[in-house]
Image: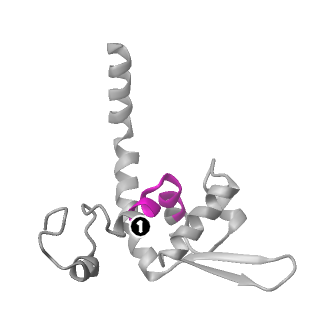
Amino acid sequence: MTAEGGGVPLSERLARGDLMAKACPSREVLKHITSRWGVLVLLALRGGTHRFSELRRAIGGVSERMLAQTLQWLEGDGLVDRVAYEVVPPHVEYSLTPLGREAAEKVRGLADWIEVSLPRIVERWEEREGDS
């Protein structure tokens, strides 16, 4: 299939998604999942249900605003469940949906590769600094 769909009707293309097509909504999902915070939220939630504050502590460096926005995106995409308990103080828990667990497994592979490959990557950075 070409980037423009190659004559395939839009409804058929959207049934699967076509990341190469400019107007395909799958690009929005890609942005949510592969953003720095999206990946880290998915990885953190692989371990089970967490409250907002637990997630924020687990994901070093994320601001409250970015974490809230990322959770909203992932919830909107059907990857994260949000359960609010009507107690005082308010208690909200986040967990992965079955679809979210699938996505988390995919990004886990990428995260593993990055962590294992980091020494080679850093070596390349140092080589480039030496060339400057």
Instruction: Tell me the chief SS of the magenta region.
Output: helix
Q: Is residue 38 magenta?
A: yes
The residue that appears at 43% across and 59% down in the rendered structure is 31
In which quadrant of the rendered image does the C terminus lie? top left
In the picture, measured across the screen, residue 52 lies left or right of residue 74, that is right
Amino acid type shown at disc 1: Val
In the picture, measured across the screen, residue 80 lies left or right of residue 9, that is right
The residue tagged with tag 1: helix, strand or loop?
helix
The residue at the far bottom in this view is 86
User: Which quadrant of the figure has residue 111?
Assistant: bottom left
Q: Is residue 49 magenta?
A: no
Eyeballing the image, is 71 above or below 57? below
Residue linked to disc 1 = 29
Eyeballing the image, is 116 above or below 56? above
Q: Which residues are magenta?
A: 29-41
User: Which quadrant of the figure has residue 6?
Assistant: bottom left
Give residue 127's position: percent from left, percent from top.
33, 21
In which quadrant of the rendered image does the N terminus lie? bottom left
Q: Is the residue marked by circle 1 packed among few (<14), some (14-19), or many (20+) residues within 10 Å?
A: some
Give residue 39's position: percent from left, percent from top.
47, 59
